[in-house]
Image (cartoon, rainbow, N blue to C red):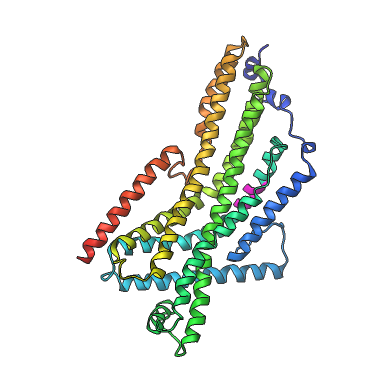
Amino acid sequence: MSLIANLQKNGSSVFQNRIAPITENRWSLETRKKLFTDRIFITRMFYFVALVFPLKPQETSRNKLCRRLLENGSTLLLSLYIIGDLKNLFYLVWKLPMGLIFSSLFTDIFSITIRLTLLFKRQAILSAMVHLQDTFPRLQPTKFVSQRLHMIIGLCGSCIIPIAFFWFTADLCSQGSEALLKVYVEDTFFGWSAENKWVSCVIFVTVDLLVVNQQYILFEFLLILSWYLLNLLKQTVESFVTEAVQEQDMESLFESYIRYSRIISKCMSMVEEALSMLLLVLYGFMVFSIFSVTTYLMTADLSVLPAMMVVPKLILFFVMMAGFYIVSFQAVAVHEVAIKVKHTIHELVSVSDSSDFGMKCLLLTLATDFPSKVVVTCWGLFSVKRSFLQKTASGMFTYAILLSQLGNQTRH
């Protein structure tokens, strides 16, 4: 009796007996160490932005209290800064270009939303990371490579924006900038400023570093985390290509597809639960930051502005663009390898000499539908595919031009 006939007669339980479990002996001690090193590196990385991923199922009351004080204090500081920024935008609504007001408003909203979303989703993120770290090395134990070096490079790159903005902030403490420093301090602290210049300078620089830490370093750490999880997901999906070409007959290929599709479906659901909403607010923050910079550069008189005000904006623009495409390319790659799986199965079925045409037809149908189930989404609102990059790139350019024109009309 054919496998299809058994399936129709006995249901899917026939596959449960045929599918061999993935055993622990395929793991090596070296692989376990690499996994643990990556996990510890990521969790410690987020300590710098006052966010703790609970690796232990239980924590002491003291650690729990310290964690809550640290996280809530940082969230409160960022919230107060954004409230002050929104207040200043309200007072300047008739003085600044409307496009700049609009983009700055949503940049502030998304910056606090990123932190709140991460606090809400961190357990799901940790669960997805652990599951992916466990799954791929089990499937392809000889191909697992630690991504720590790439994450270290990303960590070094995350210092670019803070250094650029610190250059401008530190210059406010120089001789002759007392009036401008007073304006910035009063805008930040709701009208308060110290009589002593150096007191104002120290307080402002400290708070500004903490806020930049929460706004931009947190954002760049999330880029690293998203890239890491999506890379693991891509490798997990792609591992089926290696497995499929090793199958000797159509029945083994069919069983292998069923086993892998279940594994990948579980990985996709966990990644979607962890990242879909976070990717939405992350994209929102990057896009409106790009709009804010482009509107500023297109409406300001750059010939009279000092370099210390223009250069940080340019650096911010290029970092946001790079971050946008790094995450997007990695998310698109997940769908691309799913298409590669489909083509591999189609090719294997086409060259097979099996006479079980029912099984071939079923496998081709399942493989054709496979890529539609392996797509990274932004909270279900849109899918990150190849067409997403093409449409978004042209859309960002168009909206940036529209916002800058809106700003010019407001000034006129």
Is residue 22 visible in the rendered image? The answer is yes
What residue is shown at x 43% (from left), y 84% (from top)? 175
Q: Residue 148 placed where, x, y %?
A: 66, 51
Q: In this view of the protein, which residue sits in the foreground, 15 or 136?
A: 136
Is residue 123 visible in the rendered image? The answer is no
Q: Residue 151 placed where, x, y %?
A: 61, 53
Looking at the image, residue 294 sits to the left or right of residue 118; the answer is left
Q: Which residues are magenta?
A: 124-130
Count how many numbered circles sit on residues in the image. Answer: 0
Looking at the image, residue 92 sits to the left or right of residue 11; the answer is left
Q: Residue 110 placed where, x, y %?
A: 44, 59
Q: Is residue 142 above or below residue 319?
A: above
Residue 267, quarter of picture: top right
**Magenta residues, dominant SS class:** helix
Q: Residue furthest top?
A: 355
Looking at the image, residue 65 sits to the left or right of residue 72; the answer is right
246 falls in the magenta region: no
